[in-house]
Image (tube, helix red, strand yellow):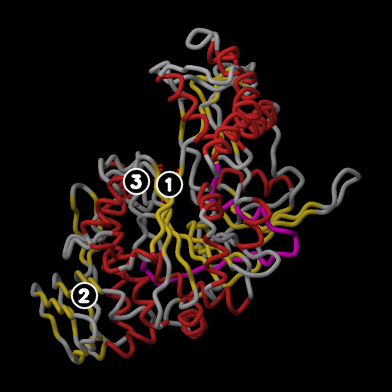
């Protein structure tokens, strides 16, 4: 566009977008910019630096929200109305267990899923959501920079990138990774990637997408709040559901599909097992031809973890029948079941029949309900929710400003009733398949004492060693049992410190090949790192001792 066209586009936006928005939000400017209407209506206007900054912020926020800020306000008014009226979006739905598979590690079905999955994973793109503040963890830095374990200090981001490189090595071509960041995590994540040379990933395979916040809302009329500085809008995080709109805005789904990729795997900032479970999940997605597959773990009835449910609502005079498979928050599941005379009763194994969602999503790229088509249709805007804390029973004002939020696992709401949506439950005797690091140490200690998962640094580390020891045992290695130890008040069952690079092995078949017998004694450490091919044949690491094996690309070491 030439300068004149740019100018007339800017004028058009002021007239058609900014002025109507300001009219809706006129309360904002009563004191700070009483003459806004006259000023903005005047071509060739002279504005102060503060006014230009406010216009710039609004322009950015308007551009980032699918449909713009006026749509944001309209959505807020409707959601706040429904919230104040106490409407239940799940009303009238009957829950049942959806399509899916439960795979038990070391079993035939698990192996078969991994075999199909390691092929399918070679045609995957990967998306890491890492924009969260991590308030519960109370750590000043970024979560992906935290060590997965304290033996090598390998951080989550290295751990993830190396797994994607390892799958790419098998594919014979590099696979892409997109990372969603936010204002809170953008600069430090970029700095870490730069310092570490992207952990070996090429720049062209890495996309960094930055999510924005959304305006705070002060009342049921969807009025925005001014920040304390009096010069800008107050904004709050919009949630990890932003990832789909960002993938759409970056044109990634179309690009990946055109590059011959078939699925996208979404995962979170601190679950060290994410990319290992991705493999078995890919196998199930390929077998059942799922458009959308949620990674799950077995959940106990009542456990505070979302449940994947199929929801059916019969046709009424006003609406057609509706069926969708969705994550139902644990506190909504019991009332939903009660509404149809059922309960979350345990199965013979003690688990709930509804699998527990761990927010690792595997989405098919192609087809009518494929990711590329759905993003084209919707811009990736997943339905939002609002969670205001009302000041009193009249439900007209809030204790503090609220905002709309969205969750990436609500994506199936964008699919048609024909879409195949299912789950994969992974189980491993006495070893966790999901062990995120979300809680500060003191909170983690309290949770462990209450018999819950600690989800804190010590438990994340102990669970990673246990997982790796379990993989070594596939190759017949005799690994010492766990010892109960306590670190900073957090009791953990600590197995030998096994730190295994994804280049060493990804599947149980790999571990049968790359480990042949041997032993790991109590309190020992074994590190296998680097991009070479390593076989441990009859290797014994005695109690209290350590072995570190480091290889470079192309090395073959037995
Ligand atoms: P969490 O539930 O762990 O939330 O997010 P959080 O914001 O990181 O941590 P708390 O609640 O403040 O303690 C789940 C995943 O979603 C990402 C996080 O980075 C994590 O990988 N996330 C969350 C985003 O990318 N953006 C968001 O706005 C929120």
**Residues at discs 2 and 1 in contact (Cβ within 8 Å):** no
| Residue nearest the observer in this picture, 255 or 474 | 255
**Magenta region:** 406-433
Mark closest to the chain's N terminus, 2 or 1:
1
Determine the image quadrant of residue 168: bottom left
Q: Residues within 10 Å of mark 3 (few under 14, many from 20)?
A: some
Q: Position of residue 47 (x, y in %)?
A: 46, 17
Q: Are marks 3 and 1 in contact (CB under 8 Å)?
A: yes
Q: Judge whether residue 17 is colored magenta.
A: no
Badge number at residue 529: 2
Helix or strand or loop: what does disc 3 sit on? helix
Pointer 3 residue:
186
Q: Which residue is mark 1?
A: 210
Which is more toward the observer, 164 or 54? 54
Relative vertical location of residue 428 with respect to residue 434 in this rendering, above or below: below
Compared to residue 471, the image places residue 183 above or below, namely: above
Picture residue at 53% right of the left edge, 20% below the top: 44
Q: How many marks?
A: 3
Tell me the crowding category of disc 2: few under 14, some 14 to 19, or many 20 or more residues within 10 angstroms, Cα based.
many
Q: Say left or right for 431 vs 45.
A: left
What percent of the width, then of the height, locates residue 141? Answer: 26, 44
How far is mark 2 from mark 1, CA to CA?
31 Å
N-terminal label among 2 and 3: 3
Label 2 beta carbon less than 8 Å to ligand 1: no
Give the secondary structure at mark 2: strand
Q: Residue at x 51, y 29 (%)?
A: 58
Disc 3 versus disc 1: distance between alpha carbons?
A: 7 Å
Left or right: residue 87 versus residue 525 is: right
Q: Is residue 407 magenta?
A: yes
Report crowding for label 1: few under 14, some 14 to 19, many 20 or more residues within 10 A (C-alpha). Answer: some
Point out the frontmost of discs 2 and 1. 1
């Amino acid at each position: 566009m030439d300068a004149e066209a740019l100018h007339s586009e800017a004028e058009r936006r002021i007239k058609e977008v900014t002025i109507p928005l300001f009219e809706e939000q006129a309360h904002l400017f009563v004191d700070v910019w009483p003459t806004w209407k006259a000023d903005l209506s005047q071509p060739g206007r002279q504005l102060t630096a503060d006014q230009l900054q406010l216009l710039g912020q609004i322009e950015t926020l308007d551009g980032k929200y699918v449909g713009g800020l006026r749509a944001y306000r309209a959505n807020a008014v409707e959601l706040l109305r429904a919230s104040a009226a106490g409407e239940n979006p799940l009303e009238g739905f009957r829950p049942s267990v959806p399509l899916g598979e439960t795979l038990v590690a070391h079993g035939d079905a698990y192996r078969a899923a991994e075999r199909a999955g390691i092929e399918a994973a070679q045609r995957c793109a990967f998306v890491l959501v890492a924009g969260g503040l991590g308030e519960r963890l109370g750590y000043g830095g970024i979560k992906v920079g935290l060590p997965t374990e304290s033996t090598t200090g390998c951080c989550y981001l290295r751990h993830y990138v190396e797994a994607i490189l390892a799958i790419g090595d098998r594919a014979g071509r590099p696979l892409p990774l997109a990372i969603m960041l936010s204002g809170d995590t953008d600069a430090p994540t970029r700095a870490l990637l730069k310092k570490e040379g992207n952990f070996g990933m090429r720049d062209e395979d890495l996309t960094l997408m930055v999510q924005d916040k959304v305006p705070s809302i002060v009342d049921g009329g969807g009025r925005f709040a001014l920040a304390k500085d009096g010069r800008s809008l107050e904004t709050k995080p919009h949630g990890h559901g932003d990832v789909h709109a960002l993938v759409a805005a970056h044109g990634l789904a179309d690009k990946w599909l055109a590059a011959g990729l078939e699925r996208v795997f979404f995962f979170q900032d601190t679950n060290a097992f994410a990319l290992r479970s991705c493999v078995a999940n890919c196998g199930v997605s390929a077998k059942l031809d799922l458009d959308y597959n949620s990674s799950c773990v077995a959940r106990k009835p009542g456990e505070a973890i979302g449940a994947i449910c199929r929801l059916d609502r019969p046709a009424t005079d006003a609406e057609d029948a509706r069926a969708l498979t969705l994550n139902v928050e644990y506190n909504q599941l019991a009332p939903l079941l009660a509404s149809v005379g059922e309960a979350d009763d345990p199965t013979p194994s003690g688990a709930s029949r509804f699998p527990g969602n761990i927010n690792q999503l595997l989405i098919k790229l192609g087809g009518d309900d494929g990711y590329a088509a759905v993003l084209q249709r919707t811009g990736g805007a997943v339905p939002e929710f609002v969670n205001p804390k009302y000041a009193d029973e009249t439900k007209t004002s809030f204790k503090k400003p609220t905002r709309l939020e969205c969750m990436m696992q609500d994506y199936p709401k964008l699919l048609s009733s024909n879409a195949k949506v299912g789950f994969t439950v992974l189980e491993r005797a006495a070893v966790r398949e999901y062990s995120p690091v979300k809680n500060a140490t003191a909170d983690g200690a309290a949770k462990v004492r209450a018999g819950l998962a600690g989800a804190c640094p010590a438990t994340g580390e102990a669970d990673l060693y246990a997982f790796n020891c379990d993989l070594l045992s596939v190759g017949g290695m005799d690994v010492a049992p766990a010892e109960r130890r306590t670190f900073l008040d957090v009791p953990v069952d600590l197995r030998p410190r096994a730190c295994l690079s994804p280049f060493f092995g990804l599947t149980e078949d790999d571990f049968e090949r790359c480990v042949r017998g041997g032993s790991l004694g109590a309190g020992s450490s074994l590190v296998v790192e680097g991009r070479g091919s390593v076989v441990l044949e009859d290797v014994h690491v005695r109690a209290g001792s350590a072995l570190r094996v480091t290889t470079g690309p192309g090395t073959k070491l037995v």
